[in-house]
Amino acid sequence: MNAASERSFDPRATVAMGREEALRLLASVPFGRVIFTRDALPAVRPVNHLVDDGEIVIVRTKLTSRLTSSVRADSNIVVAYEADDIDPIEQLGWSVVVTGIARPVTDPERVARYEALLRPWVDGMMDSIVAIEPTLVTGVRLVAKKAG
């Protein structure tokens, strides 16, 4: 057994956080998951990201990916983006979800800037950049529940 399975599971509480704190925490981690619709069903893909101007989530992907195809087909596609940092043993940490409109980035200056800042983390050509403009930003902290 590992330490996580041997641990006594003390109750945890969730504490909602504000938009600014949630976006700051999102910017502090390099990876997350983009959630979009694929053939009318939910699809989830792990990607790396950066947060620009304190709130626009930028991801790089393949031009041939389902996400990019969906974004190019509908300039107003709604996606969600989730990232977290939760200790697997202590079960403390946070989770943030951003929901908003995803659009391809086509301006050559912005493309060059994002290509320099956001290096692909998997093999293969990441030749498309998608910006997610958040409408809803929600976040929770997982904290130890106070006794009594």
Image (tube, rainbow, N blue to C red):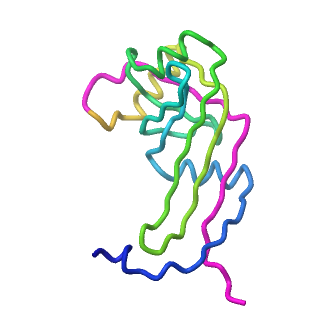
Residue 118 lies, with reference to residue 88, above or below; the image says: above
Residue 21 place in picture, x, y as percent: 68, 55
Residue 29 lies, with reference to residue 93, above or below; the image says: above
Is 5 in front, or is 146? 5
In this rendering, position of residue 69 left or right of residue 147: left
What predominant SS class does the magenta segment belong to?
Answer: strand
Residue 57 picture quarter: top right
In this rendering, position of residue 67 left or right of residue 148: left
Residue 81 picture quarter: top right
The N terminus lies in quadrant = bottom left
Residue 62 place in picture, x, y as percent: 37, 21
Residue located farthest toward the bottom when viewing the structure as drawn: 148
Residue 93 picture quarter: bottom right
Residue at the (53%, 34%) spot, across then down: 35
Residue at the (53%, 32%) spot, across then down: 58
Residue located farthest toward the top when viewing the structure as drawn: 73
For the magenta stretch, what is the residue range? 123-148
The C terminus lies in quadrant = bottom right
Residue 22 lies, with reference to residue 92, above or below; the image says: above
Residue located farthest toward the left when viewing the structure as drawn: 123
Is 102 in front, or is 2? 2
Residue 94 place in picture, x, y as percent: 58, 60
Asked if residue 22 is among those painted magenta in the image, a careful observer would answer no
Is 17 in front, or is 56? 17
Asked if residue 139 is among those painted magenta in the image, a careful observer would answer yes
In this rendering, position of residue 13 left or right of residue 94: right
Is 54 in front, or is 14? 14
Q: Tag count in the figure?
A: 0
Residue at the (73%, 34%) spot, across then down: 135
Residue at the (47%, 18%) spot, across then down: 68
